[in-house]
Image: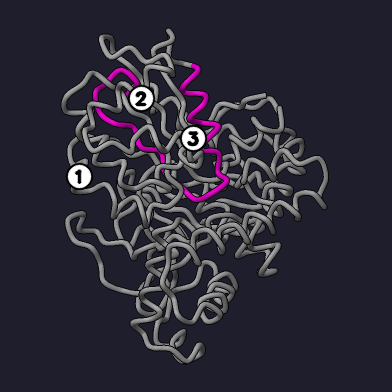
């Protein structure tokens, strides 16, 4: 059974445009499945799905004269006299294909859809050669809405309603019904394969396999890190510090490497979607605030399986992953004093995360948010509360 991902509705609007559709994201988030779903949406037969990990299908593009590629596609049913749709899975395996894509895009009526497993690699591969010719979509592990869909649980999608409606429409019975699913989501995360696994032991096996696959196929294959064990140790340290500010000097000292080495490790982890960095908030929309960034992981399943972090940090990471769909995120903290976990600057909304929120938490948030001119604010809670201004985390 195929489950529709939220991002598909955004890709739908681009299917009939000329631009190349690029779907990127870390391994095992469902890029190939999504690509096949898009393939099935295209009417007619003038289309082909090619797996570039297949050596025979790689050979289609191994031509000095790129026009000959069209002849190579004829046995696959592609008629060059009509608009054709070519789907290329795992393009990072054959990066030189990008030059052929550029030529065919410029000279023929072809719509390309491609996937690649690493933004670190793809962003270095695509910017110049396909400038103005591509639209990039990033696919992540499931958010909680998608997780419920994968579990075949009927629910109202949360992204369509605003935060005020979320707070007003919260329902204790609904939250109680969904609690076991949210607990599972927190514990095992949102990788599709893990979500669909029949039992917890199988989920753990898949999580371990996904992590090892990332380490072997992304870190060892793409990175040129001489001290791979130090990189691994830093990865564990970052997991344990989820939701905390990065201190490069301290990491450098603990791991016995230079700050420059730490910077390169962090850049790689961020580029391959394993971690996400959150910048401080500024009231000046045109000015990026300098200051320590907070770190979050790509999936809570890794945190519980590999790091065993506190419940509050796990919940905060989950809230971060589910807030991304609403736009850019920042955090706020004075040099000394109260902090606001998340700010949506484009919506001018502040959110604080608590495992068990109270009216006092909302009062404190109101005071801090007001001091920086933010008039809409909510506490998001791991446990249901009838108090005003508190939204259940599972409703985000």
Q: Residues within 10 Å of mark 1 (few under 14, many from 20)?
A: few
* Residue 84: percent from left, percent from top: 33, 16
> Quick check: 194 left or right of 377?
right
User: Contact (CB < 8 A) between labels 3 and 1?
Assistant: no
Q: Quadrant of residue 293?
A: bottom left
Instruction: Answer whether residue 361 is magenta in the image.
Output: no
Give the quadrant of residue 269. bottom left
The C terminus is located in which quarter? Answer: top right
Residue denoted by label 1: 129
Residue 244 against residue 133 in the figure, above or below: below
Left or right placement of residue 291 versus residue 384 in this view: left
- For the residues labelled 2 and 1, say whether their Cβ atoms are less than 8 Å apart: no
- The CA span between labels 2 and 1 is 23 Å
Q: Against 118, is 341 above or below?
A: below
Looking at the picture, how far across and down is residue 126, in whole percent?
27, 47
Give the mark nearest the N terminus, 3 or 1.
Answer: 3
Marks 2 and 1, the one that precedes in the sequence: 2
Q: Does residue 375 show up?
A: no
Residue in the picture at 30% in, 22% down: 70
Nearest to the eye among marks 3 and 2: give it: 2
Q: Give the camera-side residue of 88 and 18.
A: 88
Q: Please name the residue that numbered disc 3 is placed on.
A: 51
| Bounds of the magenta segment | 14-40
User: Secondary structure under badge 1?
Assistant: loop
**Left or right: 164 with respect to 214?**
left
Task: Determine which residue is flagged by label 2.
Answer: 72
Query: Which secondary structure, mark 2?
Result: helix
Q: Secondary structure at mark 3?
A: strand
Q: Residue at x 50, y 57 (%)?
A: 352
């Amino acid at each position: 059974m195929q489950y529709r991902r939220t991002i598909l509705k955004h890709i739908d609007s681009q299917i009939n445009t000329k631009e190349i559709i690029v779907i990127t994201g870390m391994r095992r988030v469902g890029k190939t499945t999504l690509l096949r779903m898009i393939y099935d949406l295209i009417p007619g037969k003038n289309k082909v799905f090619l797996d570039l990990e297949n050596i025979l299908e790689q050979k289609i593009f191994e031509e000095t004269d790129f026009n000959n590629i069209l002849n190579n596609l004829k046995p696959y049913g592609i008629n060059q006299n009509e608009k054709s749709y070519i789907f290329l899975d795992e393009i990072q395996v054959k990066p030189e294909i990008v030059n052929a894509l550029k030529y065919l895009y410029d000279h023929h009526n072809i719509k390309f859809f491609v996937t690649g497993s690493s933004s670190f690699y793809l962003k270095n591969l695509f910017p110049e050669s396909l400038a103005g010719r591509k639209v990039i979509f990033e696919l992540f592990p499931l958010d909680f809405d998608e997780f419920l869909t994968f579990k075949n649980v009927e629910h109202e999608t949360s992204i369509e309603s605003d935060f005020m409606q979320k707070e007003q429409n919260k329902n204790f019975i609904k939250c109680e019904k969904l609690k076991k699913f949210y607990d599972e989501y927190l514990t095992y995360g949102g990788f599709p394969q893990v979500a669909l696994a029949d039992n917890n032991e199988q989920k753990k096996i898949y999580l371990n396999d996904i992590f090892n696959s990332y380490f072997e196929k992304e870190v060892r294959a793409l990175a040129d890190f001489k001290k791979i064990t130090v990189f691994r140790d830093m990865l564990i340290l970052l997991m344990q510090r989820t939701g905390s500010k990065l201190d490069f000097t301290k990491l450098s000292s603990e791991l016995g490497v230079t700050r420059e080495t730490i910077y390169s490790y962090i850049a790689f982890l961020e580029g391959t979607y394993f971690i996400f960095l959150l910048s401080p908030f500024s009231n000046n929309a045109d000015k990026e605030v300098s200051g320590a960034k907070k770190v979050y992981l790509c999936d809570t399943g890794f945190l519980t399986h590999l790091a065993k972090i506190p419940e509050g940090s796990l919940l905060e990471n989950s809230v971060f992953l589910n807030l991304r769909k609403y736009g850019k995120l920042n955090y706020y903290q004075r040099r000394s004093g109260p902090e606001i976990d998340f700010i949506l600057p484009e919506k001018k909304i502040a959110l604080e995360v608590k495992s068990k929120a109270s009216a006092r938490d909302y009062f404190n948030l109101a005071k801090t948010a007001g001091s920086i001119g933010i008039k809409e604010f909510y506490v998001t809670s791991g446990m249901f509360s009838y108090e005003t201004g508190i939204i259940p985390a599972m409703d985000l």
